[in-house]
Amino acid sequence: MIDIYTDEYFMKEALKEAQKAYDEDEVPIGAIIVSNKRIIARAHNMTEALNDATAHAEMLAITAAENFLSSKYLNDCSLYVTLEPCVMCAGASYWSRLAKVVYGASDQRYGFKKAGNKLFHPKTEIISGIMEQETGELLRSFFLKKR
Amino acid sequence: MIDIYTDEYFMKEALKEAQKAYDEDEVPIGAIIVSNKRIIARAHNMTEALNDATAHAEMLAITAAENFLSSKYLNDCSLYVTLEPCVMCAGASYWSRLAKVVYGASDQRYGFKKAGNKLFHPKTEIISGIMEQETGELLRSFFLKKR
């Protein structure tokens, strides 16, 4: 039997969230959290709407998922996010002990990688470059529009 | 004229917040944010109460201050926190562009320093060790009680 629940499948769902951000004139980044192949949290960047520099898609998704599970720990969950997480979101992932973090496009400027690879919990698996083209394209299109 | 609004003055206020956390059986860390010598946000660690691994004192204080000022940026503000911020909170400070971050006790295990000094915004001034003894003592007392 073919498993339809691939990383691409879930990244498409994160991309739908990013599109919502785009439509609201927010930097288009989306995230979802998956537990046992079920999406338990969806969020998109809301820094402008909330006037909150910490309201990144990942932060909102992590808080929502922990709320949903009534647990501080997401060690059975996977986070899908359209852009490489920043230092803050990598740190949030550390505390929530996510099993897996999957991201799309790389972020040369603000991505966690500039601070090294040790920001995540050692048990968190990191997968990059899933739907890199599509997730990056939405961001490029947003910033082109803004110029 | 003597300026009573020293770093110690404000750290005492952060320590009052940490005491509230202690009394609620949360890891006792407190934070305040100051703008023009006025305290515009107070918060303490609420990770247990909210079942949210991201509900650190600093995160709650930053969100509250940005809400109060209706601004994503805190570039005229100082954050006082009783313990060395973690990677996540250093990242949040980066995005909010805090003018100054003042902390008390060092955190060898989870403090930002283990990931280097470049997590903060280059314009953010970092001051450490203010009331180090008192802020650290409250934490030690909490963990002794827990054993």
Image: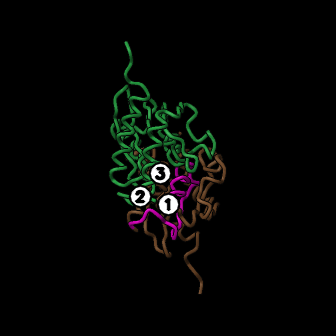
Chain colours: A green, B brown
Dot 3 and dot 2 within a common chain: no
A73 sits to left or right of B128: left
Residue type (three-letter) at the residue carrying disc 2: Asp
Dot 2 and dot 1 within a common chain: no
B74 in the magenta segment: yes
Chain that bears disc 3: B
- Which residue position holds label 3? B56
Q: Position of residue B88 (x, y in %)?
A: 53, 49
Residue type (three-letter) at the residue carrying disc 1: Ser
A145 sits to left or right of B101: left
- Figure check: A1 above or below A5: above
What's the residue at 49%, 37% (across, down)? A132
- Camera-side residue of B16 and A51: A51
Label 3 or label 2, whichever lies nearer to me, is: 2
Q: CA distance from mark 1 to mark 3?
A: 15 Å
Q: Are marks 1 and 3 in contact (CB under 8 Å)?
A: no
Instruction: Check residue B106 in the rendering and tell me which mark sits there, or answer none.
Output: none
Q: Which residues are magenta?
A: B70-96
B105 in the magenta segment: no
| Tag 2 secondary structure | loop
- Camera-side residue of B67 and A107: A107
What's the residue at 53%, 67% (across, down)? B78
| Tag 1 secondary structure | helix
What's the residue at 33%, 53% (across, down)? A24
- Which residue position holds label 1? B96
- Which residue position holds label 2? A52
